[in-house]
């Protein structure tokens, strides 16, 4: 019954948004409450659950998105995004520019959280699309594929890192096998799938770009000689990657060598926190994209203010999508899925993927589904000779399947790209499913050799 109630709630949500045209934010609040009632939660606790979910999601995303939007807008308004875009176009050529976007997204995605990579890359990809007169979605989908794959498969991202620790897998082998799996998965779910998606939903590729985050990249065009140097623009855009990479490397060295925590490591950990990384990056951009170019501080702050206004409603939608996830968890949907698989004798690799996939479909969060799956699979590993690194990747693959309305990522893509519900399902949801299925396929293939 919990799964049936969840399915009915999701169908009602889609109906209210697509047919009744009720605003997404209001719809998510209404459906969260109705699902709480349907799942048998005490009625006086449902609104508290909704508030908790919104609070947790805003706490983890608001600073990152707000500061990331400011950073993207500063780089775009100064002409830095245009300089990066034109340099990539010159190096790869208009014909191969999609591959340039995939490569850049993959490199950035290794170090950056999905949300950070998105708010950094969208203004740049927007400029590339504008300069080449290529559909933004044609370039944007492969970009999100690369970011999603690195998020699901590669340490130091939270999911694979924590799961590896819980399974007792060698994190180095997870990273190695993760790269082997990630590259073909990105090619299939990225550039190749985009060709198919363009035929199925041409409307998504033909529209004038109107997504809230994409507007951050809609700055006036400069003469190339009037834009910041490529080295300065690229350094400013890559600064979050550098900070996170340094913090991650220092932390790994500490853990491997077995050093005790001290003030130095505490400072490194603070600097490496995503929100602090974005704050320091914004301060750098204010200088490199503004003060150093003799731009008045008032003009710089105008860019800051307009960037935050552009994502205001997106932040509310993201927050309340966390409410929906919280209600599903408090309503016991995840526990119900766990009971279904208790005592199963399926291959651990397939079982981990299947459990993670069903929990993901039921409650939305990739990280939560991966961590929940780890707790369920560990007791089943006794006497098994399964490769633990591959088990981590199988779990990660299942945890990203079929992103839909109970996943914050679904709303990020919908609002950022200015897509309709139908277009988001036909592009992003299918894309995530491809990543999941390809991931499992390549894990099973690798298991024959390692």
Image: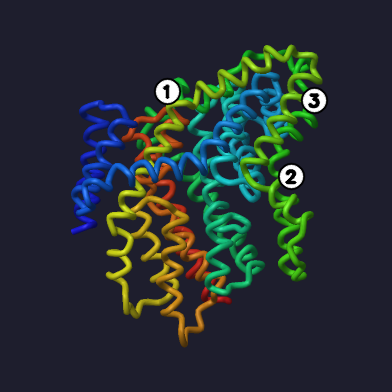
Residue 405 at least partly seen: no
- List x then y, in percent, for residue 299: 67, 12
Q: Mark 1 points at which residue?
A: 207
Q: How far apart are marks 3 and 2 (CA)?
A: 19 Å
Residue 345 tag number:
none
Q: Name the residue under label 3.
A: 229
How would you rate the neighbour count of disc 1 (Cα within 10 Å): few for under 14, some for 14-19, many for 20 or more? Answer: few
Q: Is residue 227 above or below residue 388?
A: above
Q: Which of 105 and 132 is in front in this view?
A: 105
- List x then y, in percent, for residue 277: 67, 41
- What secondary structure is found at the residue carrying circle 2? helix
Q: Which residue is drawn at 81% across and 20% down?
A: 292
Residue 288 at least partly seen: yes
Q: Name the residue under label 2.
A: 242
Q: Which residue is drawn at 58% across and 62% down?
A: 161
Mark 3 or mark 2: whose residue is earlier in sequence: 3
302 left or right, relative to 8: right
Mark 2 or mark 1: whose residue is earlier in sequence: 1
């Amino acid at each position: 019954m919990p799964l049936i109630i969840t399915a009915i709630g999701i169908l009602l949500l889609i109906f209210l948004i697509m047919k009744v045209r009720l605003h997404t934010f209001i719809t998510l609040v209404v459906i969260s409450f109705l699902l709480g009632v349907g799942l048998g939660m005490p009625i006086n606790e449902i609104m508290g659950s909704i508030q908790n979910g919104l609070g947790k999601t805003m706490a983890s995303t608001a600073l990152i998105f707000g500061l990331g939007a400011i950073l993207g807008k500063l780089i775009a308004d100064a002409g830095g995004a245009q300089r990066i875009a034109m340099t990539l176009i010159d190096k790869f050529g208009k014909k191969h520019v999609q591959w340039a976007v995939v490569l850049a997204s993959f490199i950035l995605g290794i170090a950056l959280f999905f949300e950070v990579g998105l708010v950094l890359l969208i203004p740049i990809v927007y400029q590339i699309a504008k300069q080449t007169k290529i559909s933004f979605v044609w370039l944007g989908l492969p970009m999100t594929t690369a970011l999603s794959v690195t998020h699901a498969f590669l340490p130091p991202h939270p999911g694979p890192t924590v799961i590896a620790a819980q399974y007792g897998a060698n994190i180095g082998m997870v990273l190695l096998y993760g790269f082997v799996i990630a590259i073909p998965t990105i090619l299939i779910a990225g550039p190749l799938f985009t060709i198919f998606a363009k035929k199925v939903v041409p409307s998504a590729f033909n529209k004038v770009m109107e997504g809230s985050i994409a507007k951050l990249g809609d700055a006036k065009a400069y003469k190339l000689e009037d834009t910041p140097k490529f080295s300065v623009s690229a350094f400013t855009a890559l600064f979050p990657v550098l900070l996170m990479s340094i913090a991650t490397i220092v932390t790994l060295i500490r853990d491997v060598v077995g050093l005790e925590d001290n003030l130095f490591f505490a400072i490194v950990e603070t600097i490496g926190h995503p929100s602090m990384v974005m704050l320091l990056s914004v301060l750098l951009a204010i200088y490199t994209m503004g003060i150093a170019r003799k731009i008045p501080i008032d003009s710089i702050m105008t860019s800051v203010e307009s960037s935050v206004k552009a994502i205001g409603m997106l932040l509310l939608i993201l927050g309340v999508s966390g409410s929906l996830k919280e209600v599903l968890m408090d309503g016991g949907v995840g526990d119900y899925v766990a009971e279904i698989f208790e005592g199963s004798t399926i291959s651990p690799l397939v079982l981990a993927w299947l459990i993670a996939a069903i929990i993901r479909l039921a409650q939305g969060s990739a990280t939560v589904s991966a961590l929940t799956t780890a707790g369920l699979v560990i007791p089943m590993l006794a006497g098994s000779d399964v490769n633990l690194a591959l088990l981590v990747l199988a779990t990660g693959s299942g945890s990203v399947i079929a992103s839909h309305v109970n996943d914050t990522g679904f709303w990020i893509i919908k609002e950022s790209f200015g897509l309709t519900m139908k277009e988001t399902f036909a592009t992003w949801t299918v894309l995530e499913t491809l990543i999941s299925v390809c991931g499992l396929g390549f894990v099973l293939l690798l298991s024959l050799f390692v």
